[in-house]
Image: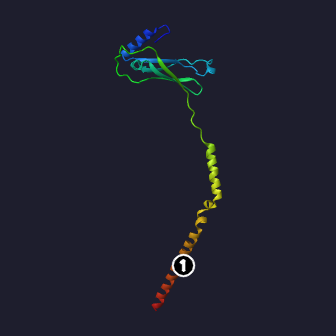
Amino acid sequence: MFSSRTTTDQILLQQKEVAAVDGLYRVRVPRVFLQADRQSERQMEGYLTAFVRACAMVESHLSDVISLHTDVSGYLIGVSIVTLPGACRGTEVEDEVDLEVFNTTLSIMAPVNAPGPETALFLERMEMESEKKGKNPQEQKSFFAKYWMYIVPLVLFLMMSGAQDQSGGGAGGGAANGGGR
């Protein structure tokens, strides 16, 4: 932990020592509201914490990106830290590593609202379809109304062929009986 009284040389020495033993670099942020008009509201208890390997911090020459994540009301709900580059090549810390100043980029990430339903567009499409159906009465007809010209001849043909079978079968049976006398 660094306090305001810690000198830059002491910080850099501690950073190299922690990196040499493959320790962690910790960022700790109090839970607060990030909106200026809500700063007077009570602060929630506790802190948000993020960690990164100390060797990654040293190898990035103290270059990092810290992201603060908020909810819809502006209340701080998360913190993350990433170094650039993001990986350690080893736990050995070179003495020549230039650790002059911290190069930290801070970003605040607010939630993004999901798109709402397109109700107006849907209703407009439905109206266009109903208008199209109104203009084309062929689509509104029933199956029988559309295909009556094919159904009626088929029914008549079936009726006629059924009537011929009945009359033909009766006449043939009578002639056979009459011929046997």
Q: Total of numbered circles in the picture?
A: 1
Residue 141 picture quarter: bottom right
Q: Residue at x 41, y 14 (%)?
A: 15
Q: Is residue 41 above or below residue 176?
A: above
Nearest to the observer: residue 163 or residue 107 = 107
* Amino acid marked by disc 1: Ala
**Image quadrant assignment for residue 90:** top left
Residue 82 position (above or below residue 18): below
Q: Residue 122: where, in percent of width, then height? A: 61, 46
Secondary structure at badge 1 equals helix
Closer to us: 32 or 85: 85
Residue at 56 percent across and 32 percent down: it is 112
Query: Does 169 sit left or right of 143 as displayed?
Result: left
Quadrant housing residue 42: top right
> Percent from the top left, x then y, of residue 172?
48, 85
Per the image, the residue denoted by label 1 is 163
- For this view, does 87 lie left or right of residue 168? left
Determine the residue located farthest toward the bottom in the rendered image.
Answer: 181
Residue 39 coordinates in the image, percent (x, y): 61, 18
